[in-house]
Image (spheres, helix red, strand yellow):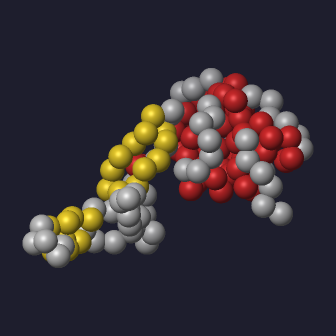
Amino acid sequence: MMPIVNILGEARVVRTSDGALAVTVPLAISRRAGRRRYGQARDSDSAATAAQLTSLQRALAKGFRWRAMLECGEVASMKEIAEAESTDNSYVGRIINLTLLAPEIIAGILDDTVPDVQIDQLGISPPLLWSEQRRLVGITASL
């Protein structure tokens, strides 16, 4: 018989009919960077800290922040962002390209449900059509 794993909730101790104790511990099993990761399940209402974010999630957040800086006129170019962040201009462009991904891909990155993909795979010349982006990542459209 397959054990039951509760994703959210408290650990439970149950006394079986033969007097033994059965302990149920909620675990979250996910894949990050091609490896399985076992750990304590996160509650849906708890905010993720920077240490819990994947590199793809951090890059996406950075891309949206940089894009907002460009759109509101805080900076005039990606070159200014690169100088302020002490990084390369092409890196800034790749990270900002992540903001142009299909909504399902962005949601999958934030939920950590997107299959194993690299930042460069999505940031360097991503396909213009969302359907091609979905095919590249390996997800089906929800619409």
Which residue is farthest right?
129
Q: Position of residue 34 (x, y in %)?
A: 51, 33
Classify residue 81 as left or right of residue 102: left
Q: Position of residue 117 (x, y in %)?
A: 63, 35
Residue 45 visible? The answer is: yes
Image point 13% across, 71% down: which residue?
18
Image point 45% across, 69% down: which residue?
44
Residue 79 visible? The answer is: no
If the image is split into quadrants, where does the N terminus sit? Answer: bottom left
Image point 85% across, 36% down: which residue?
127
As rendered, which of 71 and 45 lies closer to the eye? 45
Classify residue 76 as left or right of residue 113: right
Which residue is farthest front?
18
Image point 34% across, 72% down: which residue?
9
- Residue 137: image quadrant is top right
If the image is split into quadrants, where does the C terminus sit? Answer: bottom right
- Residue 91: image quadrant is top right
Q: Position of residue 49 (x, y in %)?
A: 40, 54
As rendered, which of 81 and 16 lies closer to the eye? 16
- The number of discs equals 0
Q: Position of residue 84 (x, y in %)?
A: 57, 34
As rendered, which of 92 and 72 lies closer to the eye? 92
Relative height, residue 7 to residue 81 (above, below):
below
